[in-house]
Amino acid sequence: MTGIGHLKATAKRIVYVSGALTAFRRFRPATLTSVMFHRVLPPDDPRAKTADPAYTVSLETFEQCLDAMADWYEPVALEDVENACLGRSKLPRNALLVTFDDGWEDTARYAVPALQARGIPCVIFISTGAIGQENVPWRDVVACAWRAGTLALPPGRPATTDPLTSLLDWLDSLPDDERAKTLEKAIEAAGQTERPLMMSPQSLRQLADDGVGLGGHGTNHIPLTAIADPEQEFHDCRTEFERLTGRVPTSFAFPHGLYAPPMLQTVQRAGFKFTFTSDKHLNPLHQGAPTSPVFGRIFISEERVTDDNGGLCREKLAYWLTLQPVMSLS
Ligand SMILES: [Zn+2]
């Protein structure tokens, strides 16, 4: 095929695919699509070199995602979702909620301004113990250093489960100061010393004052399935969230997306009326209201939505967002 022939075929395919997707969206039930991002960094930010690529999108890809999603959906705020759950208002049939996890400094520096420039609301789930800290929550440091090859089990200590879990189990067994020293060395060896990583308390307070949606994401980003008393963890996260933001939190997203079904009740008892998992599904709406206060989210990574040249592939993004199951958890 000639170059022009190839271009024509590609253009035709894109028209076909977007037409088919439009029809598909029109005839599928009304849904809330909640998308999940972590880090957003332009390539010239020094922190981009050491950010985990699985959890990072470039600023350019992020902006292109926002433009595409604004063409296909009606973005809503966390408050709109909560009001719809409480019967106070209705969501549009093609609603989109943009979410972030953890409280990275780059979320405040790059992602929020890009959203504000387009009038798209978002919600940031904050791991309260990470705010203003030098290092990311330590389990995440372990994963980064392990991937960089600067942290491993000591010789003679056999892996009991998978390598990363065994490493975490070993570090768990160390006294706090010894663990901190071990991790500090591993971070330095991995060259992960660009700072700041997490938002400062001032920057978080500014977001709260600007009306940006905020929710809880645990205190120290430890999976709730690894915590003896999840109820205490919800309580501590809530108290710290109130101190940091001056707001009462209503929503919670599970760190690492990990939870056990009974926690869906525990988290509600602790005052978080609305819960966000990392389960990959779209959320059905009935007469403009979500059918459950527990929401699935679709994870977006650079690799998932870009083509070989690195730019956003709208077709890939459209497929990824649309062809997900519609289901409800209660
Ligand atoms: Zn997280």
Image (tube, helix red, strand yellow):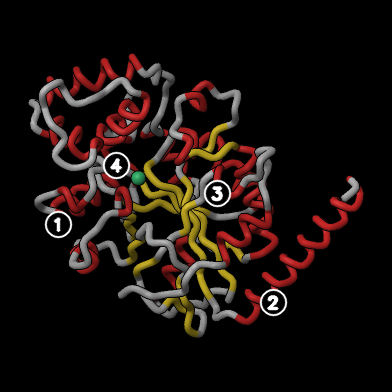
Q: Which amino acid does label 1 sit on?
A: Glu
Tell me the quadrant of the picture where the C terminus can be found.
bottom left
Q: Which of 216 and 150 is in front in this view?
A: 150
Q: Picture quarter containing residue 84? A: bottom left
Left of 283 or right of it: where is 11? right
Q: Name the residue under label 3.
A: 304
User: Is residue 117 visible to us here?
Assistant: yes
Q: How crowded is mark 2: few (under 14 residues within 10 Å), some or many (20 or more)?
A: few
Residue at screen point 55% across, 49% down:
304
Which comes sooner in the sequence, label 1 or label 2?
A: 2
Q: Which disc is residue 231 wearing?
A: 1
Residue 166, image x, y percentages: 18, 36
Residue drawn where x is 23% and y is 41% of the image: 162
Question: Which one is earlier in the sequence, the residue at label 4 or at label 2?
Answer: 2
- Residue of label 2: 23
Find disc 4 in the rendering and name its residue: 128
Residue 238, placed above or below residue 40: below
Q: Which of marks 1 and 3 is nearer the N terminus?
A: 1
Q: How far apart are marks 4 and 2 (CA)?
A: 42 Å
Q: Which amino acid does label 3 sit on?
A: Arg
Decide: is 117 above or below 140.
below
| Residue 19 image point, x, y percent | 75, 70
Give the class, few, some or many, for how many residues have Cα within 10 Å of label 4's Cα (few <14, many ≥20): many
Disc with the residue nearer the chain's start (4 vs 3): 4
- Measured in 3D between alpha carbons, the distance from the residue under mark 2 to the one under mark 3, in whole angstroms, is 23 Å
At 57% from the left edge and 66% from the top edge, which residue is drawn?
322
CA distance for labels 1 and 4: 16 Å
The residue at label 1 has a CB less than 8 Å from ligand 1: no
Q: Residue 186 carries which label?
A: none
